[in-house]
Image (tube, coloured by chain):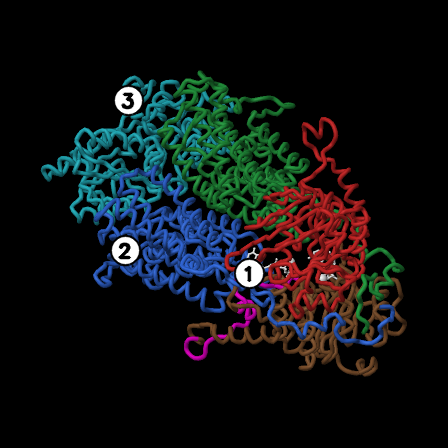
Chain colours: A brown, B blue, C cyan, D green, E red
């Protein structure tokens, strides 16, 4: 799909003129974002450009001071991450958002636990641990995180890379509308990063759109359909990786080059 | 590396080896096996075993020192009876501490609830059932206030419950006019208030309903914390509230529910207290907060939240009970007992820490 | 000793109970009884007392001496002990009802308060009509002893009581206010200061015990009024009597914890040997161990002893 | 991108733009300026200002309600005198809490030290100077024990000091045999023990040395915490002990020093206590732990460590003092005052929280 | 210098057969390491291979169960990070090791604060804040972290990237013998990463050897003199980037290829 084609479609998720201030710091300064069906939208930008704040606003973790968010064209107001999840938006946060002392299974199903069927689930509200463990193991296997020997291991006993893998698996498993990932490969090794990238592509092939924040240009140019360049708290422009080189993207991102006419936000 | 790439491209060339390599990542072999390891592993998996071991050891030691005086059915059921109130309150305290909170107002809520039960029956002439209901509601409401201030106003639990402690206690004195309702009157007009004091024969041993209630309560809580979503959320909130929120836990709701539950359990403790001492006295429960926290900590629950088991708390309370009775039967006088209990607290936690360390 | 007995006091930090324990221990040794002592942790802590009674039962004690923190709450536990054939004697404070214990060796705390009230009123003479009175009580939980002493004082001074079972409901303007001291010097000083800030012209101070009185005196000294204020107290401990002698306290009602304790131990011994229970003082429903007003400034109409005699009788 | 690279090479091609771009990274402009912002910023920079504001406001409110009764030199110096002991102990408590610890044994250490001072003078006939020295050493030693257990045995401070509280208090009662040493005897034989009670005229106002000591102590601590390496290390340990250790702080040494300092200050508080109540009494100081923690928290120091200022603690203690006296003067009786102080604690922290929030 | 030349020199820092167990996990399994004067030694390996544990042992943060560490050929025993720092080894930890509530200056000088000259420093032990702030600002400027407006800002108010920058600046400024960096660019943007790489080269040009852990192959091949490949808790081999391709390195790292004969550890 070309730039034209995309703009004719209705965005799945759209942010308009979001503003978020932290005291004297303006982390988002009328930031926009559009995510179209079935695409991988990469978001790049300097450290502190406000990328995480933007996607936190989209996932309900931060309530913007101004601006609006539209899901399938309808305005939504997320007051908590639960709202966003309820609407089908799953997020891998930069901080991972795991409870260290709980098991991998517990963490994966946090807030959407499965109950046993029948009396025990309905009245005794008993969890279906076996089922949850099964699903969790499947999801991790898909990601190739075979080395986790014990699905009931506490998350705090995993290495940083393994933790990130669990967080990614969780989002990929439960997202029904949009998956957002904030630097999902930052702590990962070469092999593990590759697996996550493959997973991202696979999620897209299931038709689900993805927002991917990354500082890794080769990764971004490899998987992204469009690249949203964030600068100074707002969108500088959106480019297609086929039309621009990495150098251009980096130049725009750092301000060395003005965003190309016509496609600037 | 000089050509400028304009097209989206595949994996970098150096990644080609990835497909051919073994797919297992660094998995280390466990070189050490055997008995010791297994024990360590079990201890690590079941943290409440540590206080259980301490408990059994202390029972054995006092049994050897005191003989039948200690190993009599009377003395052993006595420990249970002496521990029941602290045990119930400590169960409430456990749940709060699991969320990385603390509830200093447990004793005050307990006594206010029992006073409400008593005064509603005797001052206003309500049927005992209604009065007890009012007492339970009163405790839950106090808990709700704590929870509201902690969850919504985001004040530190220590300070909220410190303030509530004073407020509830003063309310208790003002409302009760410092009057005790006598046991004889209660037995005559509203025996239901003393329900938890009734005795029952379970397989030869005599228990009060209060003791049974304590055990059942702990088991139910252990089930709820371990087997339900709510329980998992309690742990998650205590572990890292920010992460819990981001991963879809309704942190505020969980906190409110925990403090309300704590209030409700304390109200039950107030009812059990009437059963235990017979009368309704506004001066009871002054040490319940310190004693319950002691039981919780000896039971191995971390004051930083998220780690430990409510079963441990029960053992913790029993350990203190065993030591207190044992030392008193050995003839230590009150101040020496306090001194030794102080040492016990430190020693119990040190042993716990040590076992955890060798069994990482 | 094959015979054991228990002493259960309200706390074991208040010198009054410490001396009671010493008296009981000495007597028990003399009579060949093994004595175990127990105490609540703070005033009003009666759960610990219930547990103590149970422990004594488990221990197979012959008799229990008890100063109850909550005179009616303790009754079921006492009944349990008596049902096991243990002689229970209430010391210092009668149980409610009095006959819940086998015998009671106590002081009349109301009377103790009344004596110092009468003395203070008589000492002031005509000025009593517009006295300014500070009431330094024990704790906000209003334990019985504190209420009895407080209300006794007010009655003796000639002030109309509201409900005699609680303090703080008097309407007489001469009462500047009540504050609580926890029965120690620190609390005494703080409470006195608070009331002085309310009315610096206070000239009569009632205190729950002598440590509180000593604290109140420090507060008065702090503003240079230590010589024109009348302090009265209850207890009759040796430092207290010494303070009466030194003029810190005007008068104190002396009680006899050692006497109570030794009488109690004797009664247990007698009961174990012969099965006899002690008789109450004629005309009262308990054995009154007596109370005496100790002052070096006696007044007409109020019987008193001087500090020399008080020092002979004092308990620690 | 198909050539396999065998040589160490320079930056990837896409990075070429880096040298030409502007070198400043995302720096946002502050759109809002002015008065309000400045106040907010100042509040944020100086956290102890918040309790100061609450203090000033409460003085003003009570002044308006009570007039000269409250604004008299008597009432105002009275507050200082009533606050001095809690103020000194709270200063010790602050330093401990800054390391994310807590010291429940402050009151017990204080009273044991004062008893040691008294008994060494009167029981053993030592000169007062030596006895005082012994008392100070005794307090420091108790603190050392706390510190050792926290830093080396790695037990939670709550539990260590809970145990020490009982141990030290029981020791105190056993050692002193519950005997009070009378004010008159001390004044006669060892007036040095009452040193902190002596009065001094500072610019027309009458202060005791105890009050002056409290203020000087807080200032010295504020200096040490802010201006010396030790102080920075205290904050770092409270903030994140693991990070502090990795970045070169001798965490154990710092912890030990903090608990020893706390013990020493408590011993000074014990000395000051003799000055205040004239006598040496083993039953004082029972509420010192709760009262000092209250002052610390109202003063804005986080119970989680690493944040807050010891100046705030002084204001916190004064706030409680002002409210207590103010309420009494307004005619609230003891029970109501107790209730209202409970409300105050919650309200003060809520206001603090609120000011911090609007001034992020 | 070639492989031969290197082996003839005395290593600055050398680890021999280090072992570290965490309960059932063996994080280091007889791991070796040699660092020669003036070189950049990159350490690469899968997530959980034990890289961080190895460098923690070198910097005193972890006490190995077995094995020995030699500094300039002499055995040393570090019982705490302070020991290692005293010996001139500075480390950037993966977790950064900063006190969030303290200022940038405080963090940079933590444990080696400067005191005022004369009486105030010696007797009142007063810190020389002005001097420390000056030095801190200089060091950050060198790294190009110009955007930090206020050197007394609390570290918690910095973005993840800025924090990492401060940690790197701290190590670079104070290392006198060896600088160790555990994934110093993981959270950094393109521009910031570049600056850190330049800084690493500059530190080397001052003659100081550096251990650099990174998952970023292009970075590693760009700056490293030698590459230590870690696998399953031990050194698989050491290669020179000029002799091997990235593919080979990745292949060895993941076990797809056996370490070349002769240079295997
Ligand atoms: N909770 C907060 N309080 C104060 N300032 C904040 C907060 N969160 C973010 N900021 C500030 O907002 C700005 C944007 O931060 P954000 O985390 O969104 O950046 P980012 O683009 O994700 O950076 P990075 O690539 O380093 O993750 C930064 O200057 C940061 O310091
Ligand atoms: N404190 C600890 N307790 C228990 N296990 C640990 C601890 N630290 C590390 N491990 C385990 O040791 C192994 C090696 O961990 P290490 O952090 O050294 O790996 P790494 O190579 O640095 O990985 P990454 O690239 O993800 O940072 C992992 O399996 C990890 O789970
Ligand atoms: Mg970010
Ligand atoms: Mg690592």
State which chain disc 3 sits on. Answer: C
- Asked if marks 1 and 3 fall on the same chain, the answer is no
> Can residue B204 be found in the magenta stretch?
no
**Where is mark 3, residue-wise?**
C304
Which of the 4 image quadrants contains residue C131?
Answer: top left
C225 or E203: which is nearer to us? E203
Tag 1 secondary structure: helix
C67 or A64: which is nearer to us? A64
**Ligand 2 within 8 Å, label 1 CB:** yes
> Can residue A112 be found in the magenta stretch?
yes
* Image-based side of D135 in relation to D253, left or right: left
Quote the CA–CA distance across marks 2 and 3: 44 Å
- The stretch of residues the image draws in magenta is A94-120
Pinpoint residue B142: horizontal percent, then vertical percent. 46, 56
State which chain disc 1 sits on. Answer: A
* Image-based side of B331 in relation to A44, left or right: left
Which quadrant of the frame does ligand 1 lie within? bottom right
Q: Is residue B208 visible?
A: yes
Label the magenta part by its dominant secondary structure: loop
Q: Residue at x 68, y 29 (%)?
A: E124
Pinpoint residue C217: horizontal percent, then vertical percent. 44, 25
Eyeballing the image, is B65 above or below A264? above
Pinpoint residue E19: horizontal percent, then vertical percent. 57, 54
Eyeballing the image, is D320 above or below D40? above
**Where is mark 1, residue-wise?**
A157
D289 or A158: which is nearer to us? A158
A179 or E235: which is nearer to us? E235
- Asked if marks 2 and 1 fall on the same chain, the answer is no
- Asked if marks 2 and 3 fall on the same chain, the answer is no
Q: Which of the two marks, 1 or 3, is nearer to us in this view? A: 1
């Amino acid at each position: 799909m070309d730039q034209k084609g995309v703009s004719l479609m209705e965005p799945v998720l759209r942010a308009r003129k979001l503003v978020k201030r932290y005291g004297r710091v303006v982390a988002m300064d009328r930031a926009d974002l559009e995510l179209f069906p079935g695409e991988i939208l990469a978001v790049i930008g300097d450290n502190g450009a406000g990328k995480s704040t933007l996607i936190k606003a989209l996932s309900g973790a931060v309530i913007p001071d101004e601006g609006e968010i539209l899901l399938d064209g309808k305005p939504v107001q997320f007051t908590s991450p639960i709202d966003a999840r309820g609407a089908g938006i799953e997020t891998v946060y930069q901080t991972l958002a795991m409870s260290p002392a709980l098991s991998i299974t517990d963490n994966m199903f946090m807030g959407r636990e499965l109950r046993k069927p029948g009396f025990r689930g309905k009245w005794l509200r008993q969890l279906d641990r076996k089922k949850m463990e099964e699903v969790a193991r499947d999801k991790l296997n898909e990601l190739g995180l075979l080395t986790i020997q014990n699905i009931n291991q506490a998350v705090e006993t995993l290495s940083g890379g393994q933790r990130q893998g669990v967080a990614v698996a969780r989002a990929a498993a439960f997202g029904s509308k949009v998956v957002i990932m904030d630097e999902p490969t930052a702590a990962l090794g070469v092999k593990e990063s590759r697996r996550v990238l493959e997973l991202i592509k696979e999620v897209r092939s299931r038709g689900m759109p993805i927002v991917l924040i990354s500082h890794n240009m080769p990764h971004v140019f490899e998987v992204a359909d469009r690249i949203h360049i964030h600068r100074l708290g707002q969108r500088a422009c959106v480019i297609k990786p086929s039309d621009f080189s990495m150098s251009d993207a980096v130049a725009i991102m750092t301000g060395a080059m003005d965003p190309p006419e016509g496609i600037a936000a | 590396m000089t050509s400028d790439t304009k097209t989206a491209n595949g994996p970098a060339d150096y990644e080609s080896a990835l497909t051919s390599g073994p797919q297992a990542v660094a998995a280390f072999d466990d070189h050490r096996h055997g008995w010791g390891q297994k024990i360590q592993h079990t201890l690590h998996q079941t943290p409440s075993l540590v206080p259980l071991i301490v408990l059994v050891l202390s029972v054995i030691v006092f049994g050897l020192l005191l003989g039948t005086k200690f190993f009599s059915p009377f003395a052993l059921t006595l420990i249970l009876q002496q521990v029941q109130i602290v045990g119930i309150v400590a169960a409430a305290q456990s749940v709060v501490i699991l969320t990385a909170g603390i509830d200093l107002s447990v004793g005050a809520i307990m006594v206010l609830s029992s006073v409400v039960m008593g005064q509603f029956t005797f001052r206003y002439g309500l049927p005992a059932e209604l009065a007890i209901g009012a007492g339970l509601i009163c405790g839950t409401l106090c808990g709700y206030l704590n929870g509201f201030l902690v969850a919504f106003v985001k004040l530190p639990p220590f300070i909220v419950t410190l303030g509530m402690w004073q407020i509830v206690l003063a309310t208790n004195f003002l409302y009760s006019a410092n009057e005790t309702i006598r046991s004889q009157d209660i037995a005559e007009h509203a025996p239901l208030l003393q329900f938890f004091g009734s005795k029952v024969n379970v397989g030869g041993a005599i228990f009060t309903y209060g003791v049974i209630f304590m055990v059942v309560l702990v088991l139910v809580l252990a089930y709820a914390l371990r087997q339900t979503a709510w329980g998992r959320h309690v742990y998650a909130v205590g572990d890292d509230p920010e992460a819990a929120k981001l991963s879809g836990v309704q942190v505020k709701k969980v906190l409110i529910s925990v403090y309300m539950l704590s209030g409700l359990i304390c109200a039950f403790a107030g009812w059990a207290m009437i059963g235990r001492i017979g009368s309704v006295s506004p001066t009871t429960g002054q040490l319940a907060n310190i004693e319950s926290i002691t039981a919780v900590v000896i039971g191995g629950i971390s004051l930083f939240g998220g780690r430990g088991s409510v079963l441990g708390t029960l053992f913790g309370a029993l350990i203190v009970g065993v030591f207190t009775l044992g030392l008193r039967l050995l003839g230590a006088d009150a101040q020496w007992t306090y001194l030794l209990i102080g040492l016990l607290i430190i020693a119990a936690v040190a042993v716990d820490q040590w076992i955890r360390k060798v069994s990482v | 000793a094959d015979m054991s007995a228990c002493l259960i006091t309200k706390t074991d930090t208040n010198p009054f109970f410490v001396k009671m324990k010493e008296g009981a221990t000495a007597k028990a040794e003399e009579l060949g009884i093994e004595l175990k002592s127990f105490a609540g942790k703070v005033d009003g802590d009666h759960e610990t007392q219930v547990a103590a009674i149970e422990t004594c039962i488990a221990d197979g004690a012959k008799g229990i001496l008890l100063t109850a923190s909550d005179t009616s709450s303790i009754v079921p536990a006492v009944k349990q002990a008596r049902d096991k054939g243990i002689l229970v004697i209430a010391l210092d404070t009668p149980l409610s009802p009095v006959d819940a214990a086998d015998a009671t060796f106590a002081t009349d705390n109301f009377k103790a308060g009344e004596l110092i009230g009468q003395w203070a009123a008589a000492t002031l003479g005509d000025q009593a009509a517009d006295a300014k009175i500070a009431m330094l009580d024990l704790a906000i939980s209003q334990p019985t002893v504190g209420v009895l002493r407080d209300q006794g004082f007010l009655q003796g001074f000639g002030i109309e009581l509201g409900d005699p079972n609680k303090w703080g409901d008097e309407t007489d303007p001469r009462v500047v206010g009540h504050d609580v001291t926890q029965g120690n010097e620190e609390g005494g000083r703080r409470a006195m200061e608070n009331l002085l800030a309310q009315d610096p012209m206070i000239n009569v101070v009632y205190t729950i015990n002598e440590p509180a009185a000593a604290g109140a005196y420090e507060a008065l000294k702090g503003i240079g009024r230590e010589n024109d204020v009348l302090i009265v107290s209850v207890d009759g401990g040796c430092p207290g009597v010494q303070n009466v002698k030194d003029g810190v306290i005007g008068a104190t009602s002396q009680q006899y914890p050692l006497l109570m304790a030794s009488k109690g131990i004797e009664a247990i011994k007698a009961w174990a040997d012969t099965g006899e229970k002690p008789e109450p003082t004629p005309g009262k429903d308990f054995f009154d161990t007596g109370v005496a007003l100790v002052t070096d400034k006696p007044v007409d109409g109020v019987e008193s002893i001087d500090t020399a005699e008080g020092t002979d009788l004092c308990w620690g």
